[in-house]
Image (tube, rainbow, N blue to C red):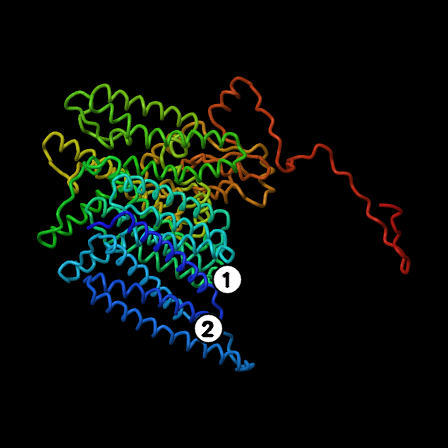
Amino acid sequence: MVASDAVLAILSLFAAGMAAATAYLLRWAGEARTPLRASTVVFLLLMMVAMLVGAAVYYVRPSSSSLVEGFWVASALMSVSVIEVFFGFLEEVRRRTDAPRPDDPPRRGRPRLFAATVLTLVLANEFLMGWTFQAAAGLPIGFGAGNLAGVLSGLASVVNSPWFLFTMSAEMLLTAVLLRHRLPRAVLVVLIGQSVIMLLSPPALAVAVWVDLSTYAASAVMIGLFVFLMEYLYRTREVGRAFGRYLLRLLGVYGLMMAGLYLWWVYGDPLAFAASVVVEMVLYFDLIVRPEEVERPDRFAWALRPGWTTGILAGIFVAELFMGALLNVAVVGSLYGAGFAPLALSGPGSRMIYAAIYNGFWFFASTTASTWFLLMMGVEMGTLVLFKFRETRSRETRVRLGLMMAAYGAFAVWFPSVYYAELFPRAPAGTSVPVLGWPMGIGSAPIATGVFGAILATYAVLGVLTFLFGRRVVCSTFCTAPLMFQGTTVDAMKSFNRSSPLARKFLSSRFSRTFSTVTGVVLVSLVLAALASALDASGRLGLVVLGADPTVFLFACYFSILWYVLFVTIPYFGTYNCVTTGWCYTGTISGAFSRLGLFRLKVRDREVCRRCTTVDCARSCPVGLVDMPGHFRSKGEFRSSKCCGVGDCVEACPYDNMYFYDARHWFREKLGVPEPPRPARLPMVRASPATPPVPVPRAKAAPSGASSPTPAGP
C-alpha cells in the first residue's frame, strides 16, 4: 500500500535533513586533522546507521515486538559507537603529551583506514535509508527466494529508488559546495557535474515523462562534462596525478553507467546501473574525504603519457557508444537496430561464440552509424572545433571550418535521418542502393537510373573540386572525420605523431612499406567484396559475412568500427591515422587525384624558410609531413597526396610566408591579376638586401697603458 502524501512529505523532509547532515559530516571528515575530530565523525555516522538499522528491523516484519527490538538494536549500536570517541580522545591526549622526537618520521595525515571506514558507513547509511524509506512509503522490496539473483535484484531496487539516488545526489552536491575552498576549479566542476548526472537518473521514478526527460537531460550534461574535460586538457596540458587517476576511473564508471541504462531501457535489467552508482559513490566520497590528494603539486604532461590519454579517449567513447544506443532506443524505439536481429546466446559453444561476435559487431556498427550517435558526436567534437575557430586567425581556415561543420550537419545528420527517409519510400520497385555504391563508388546491387545518375554526378563534382582545390575538399571538409580530428584537444594530440614509435613509421610524404601494404590490402578487399556482391546478386555465389552482403560488411567494418578503434588509439597511431596509415580508400583515391591537380603549398620567399629555425609548419602538421620545410627551401612549394589542406601549417608560420595554391591562384596567374598584399607577422628575412650593408670601421687598438675613449653621449 502506497503511503499518503503527508507521509511522503515527512519522509522527504527527513531525507533532506539526513542528506545535509551527511554532507556536513563528510566535510568534517575531509578537514579532520586530529584523532578526536576523526573519531567524532565516525561516531556520528555510526549513530545515523544505528537509527536506520533499528528502523529496518521494524520494517522487516512490522509489529509492536519488532519495534521494541529495533529500539534495543539501535541503542546497542549507539552505545558501541561511543567507544570510538573514547579511543580517539585517548589518542588525542597521547599526541599532545608526547613530545615529538627528532628521529620520528613525519606523519602522513589520516590513514586510509579512516577513509575506508567513512566510506563504508556512508554507503551503509544510504542503503539503509533507501530501504527503510522505500518500505515506509509502501513500495515493495523484493529479495526473491533468497538466492543470489534475488538478493542482487533487491539490492538494485534499493539503489535505484528515489530515496537513494536523490538523497545521494543532494549529498554529493552539498559536500562539493562545502569543500569548494579546498578543491581546484576543474575538480569542483567535475564533482558538480557528477552530482547533476546522478540527480537525473531515469530509474529513480517510474514515470514516463521523468524517464524520457531525465535521459535526454543527463545525456546533455554528460556531453557538456566531456567537452569541459577535453578543453581542460587542451588548456592546461598538465594534470595532477591524483586528479588524472580520478578521471580515468570516473570515465570507466560512466561507461558502465551508460551500458547499465541501455540494459535497463531495453531489457529492464537494473543491476548494471545500480553497480555503477555504488562504484561512483565510492569514487566520489573517497576524493571528498581525502581532498589533500588533489591539492598536491605533482603533475604530469598528458601528451607524454599515451597510455593515460588512450584510457581517457576509450572511457569517453564507451560512454558515448552506449549513450548513442540509448538515445536511439529512446527516440526511434523499435526502429533502432531493425537492420539486424540479435542472436540468442544458446546452443553449442561454437554457436554461442558466433552469436556473441555477431551481436557485438552489429551493435557497435549500427550504433556508430546511427543519426543520434553522430549528432551527439557532432555536438561534442563540433564544440571543440568552435573553440579552435575562435583561436584561428586565417580567414581561409575559418571559412573551411565553417563549411566543414555545415557538411557534417548535412551528410551525417540531415541526409541520413530526413532526406533518405523521404527518398527511399518513393523509390521504384526493386531498387536498392548498395552501401559501398553510394559513399565509396564500388558496389553491384541493382540501382535505379535516377539514383545512378545522382551517384555519377556526385563523384563528378567531387572529382572536379578535388582537382581544383585538393584533397581537403574530402578529407578536411566533406568527410565526417575532420570534425573529430580538428577540435582543439584532439588537434593537440598531433604531438603523438612524432613521439609514438608506431606513428613515426608514417611520418613524411613518402609512402612507407606499411602504408603501401595496408593500402593494397584494403583496395584488393574492396574489389573482391564488390565481385562477391555481384555474384550474390546473380545467384551464383550466395556469400554472406556475419549475415550481411560482403560490401555491407566491409563498409561497416572499416568505417563504423575500425575508424573509431583508431580514433581511440590516437596516442599510438597519431592523428589523422585514416590518412597516414592508408586504410581509408576514399581518401587514398582522392589523394591520387589531388596529386595530379592544382593544389599545393607555396612560400613567398624561400630564403625565409632557409633561415627559419622553428620549423613550426612541420610541427603543426596533423598528418606528420615533417619533410615539408626541405621542399620549401629547395623548391619553394610542397605537394603530397597525403596533404589534407587542414591549414595548421599556414597558421603556424611566424612569418606569414606560406599560402595555399589552388585554382584561384592559377586563374589569377592566367589572367594577370596580382596577388593581394599580406602584412607579415614578424619581420621578413629578404633573400637579397635592398642596399648593401655599411661597413663599420674597427677601432684602433689603444697604446699600452692608455684608456679607451668614453662615448660623449648615448
> Residue 56, position in %: x, y?
25, 63
Q: Could you say which quadrant of the image residue 486 lies in?
A: top left
Mark 1 to mark 2: distance in Å?
25 Å
The amino acid on which the numbered mark 1 sits, given as a three-letter code, is Arg
Disc 2: which residue: 36
Q: Could you say which quadrant of the image residue 546 lies in?
A: top left
**Location of the C terminus (image quadrant):** top right
- Label 1: how many Cα within 10 Å (few below 14, some 14–19, many 20+): few
| In contact (CB < 8 Å): disc 1 and disc 2 | no
Drawn side of residue 482 relative to residue 556, left or right = right
Disc 1: which residue: 296
* SS class, disc 2: helix
Residue with the most extreme top position: 671
Q: Which of marks 1 and 2 is nearer the N terminus?
A: 2
* SS class, disc 1: loop
Q: Classify 165 as above or below 603.
A: below
> Residue 160, position in %: x, y?
27, 52
Closer to the camera in the image, 159 or 622 = 159
Q: Classify 103 as above or below 493.
A: below
Q: Could you say which quadrant of the image residue 250 lies in?
A: bottom left
Closer to the camera in the image, 109 or 34 = 34
Name which residue lies at 35% across and 67% down. Answer: 47
> Residue 234, position in %: x, y?
48, 47
Residue with the most extreme front position: 64
Residue 528 seen in the figure? no
The amino acid on which the numbered mark 2 sits, given as a three-letter code, is Leu
Name which residue lies at 41% across and 78% down. Answer: 87
Closer to the camera in the image, 616 or 194 = 194
Residue 381 seen in the figure? yes
